[in-house]
Image: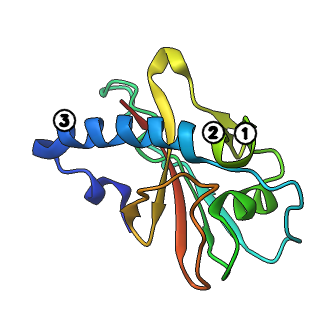
Amino acid sequence: MNPQTLRATPARSLTALTSLLLAVGLLAGCGAGDDAPADDTSASSSVAADDDSTDAPDDSTDDVEFTYEGVAGKTALELLVAADPTAVVQGEGENAFVTGIDGREAQDSAKEFWALYVNGEMAQVGAGALVTETGDEIAWKLETY
C-alpha cells in the first residue's frame, strides 16, 4: 500500500486536524504493559527514498512507517514494544504516549507525531487501549500536524 494514497491533497487540513486530535487522544489514552509478550510478531519499517529530493522540500515524514500484525487479546502498544524494544514511550498504562519508533523520534519542532492505524484506518483510541485481533495490520506512521 502506498502511504500517499491515505492522504488526498484536498483533505490535508482535515487530516491534519484528525491527526492532532489523535495525538491528544494518544496522550490521554495510551497504555504500556510492564509484561511485554515474547516476540511472536514480525514487524517492518520503511523509509522510501525520494529520487528528486533535491527539488522538493524536506517532507521526510510522508514515508516513515512501522508495521506489525495484531495478536488476539494484546494491545497495539504491547505488540509495539515487543516488535521494537527501543520504542520510546512517555508515561505508562493508558496514559502512555509513543514518541519514537525504530530509532526515529517525533520532533516537536517539526510538529511530528506517530499516528496509529489499524487495517488502514486511523485508530480512534490510544495504543494502550487498542486491543488487537489476530491478523490486524497495525501501522505507525510519522505524520505532522
| Real-space CA distance between mark 2 and mark 1, rounded to the nearest whole angstrom | 5 Å
Which residue lies under the disc numbered 2? Answer: 97
For marks 1 and 3, give the CA distance: 27 Å
Residue shown at 46%/20% (left/top)? 110
Vertically, is 138 above or below 22? below
Q: Residue at x 66, y 65 (%)?
A: 75
Q: Mark 1 or mark 3, which is nearer to you?
A: 1
Percent coordinates x, y for residue 46 in the rendering: 57, 54
Q: What amino acid is at disc 3?
A: Ser
Describe residue 91's horizontal placement relative to residue 63 as left or right.
right
State whether residue 117 is above or below residue 55: below
Q: What element carries label 1?
A: strand
Mark found first going from the N terminus, 3 or 2: 3
Report the residue at 27% width, 36% height from top.
17
Quadrant location of the N terminus in the rendered image: bottom left
Whether residue 132 is visible, yes or no, is yes
CB of mark 2 within 8 Å of CB of mark 1?
Answer: yes
- Residue that label 1 marks: 89
Disc 2 residue type? Phe
Q: Nearer the viewer, residue 106 or 96?
A: 96
Left or right? Give the position of 123 relative to 140: left
Q: What residue type is labelled 1?
A: Val
| Local SS, label 3 | helix
Q: Which residue is drawn at 18% across and 50% down?
A: 8
Ranked by sequence position, the earlier of labels 1 and 3 is 3
Residue extending furthest toward the top: 109
Residue at the disc numbered 3: 13
- Residue 57's x, y, as percent? 33, 24
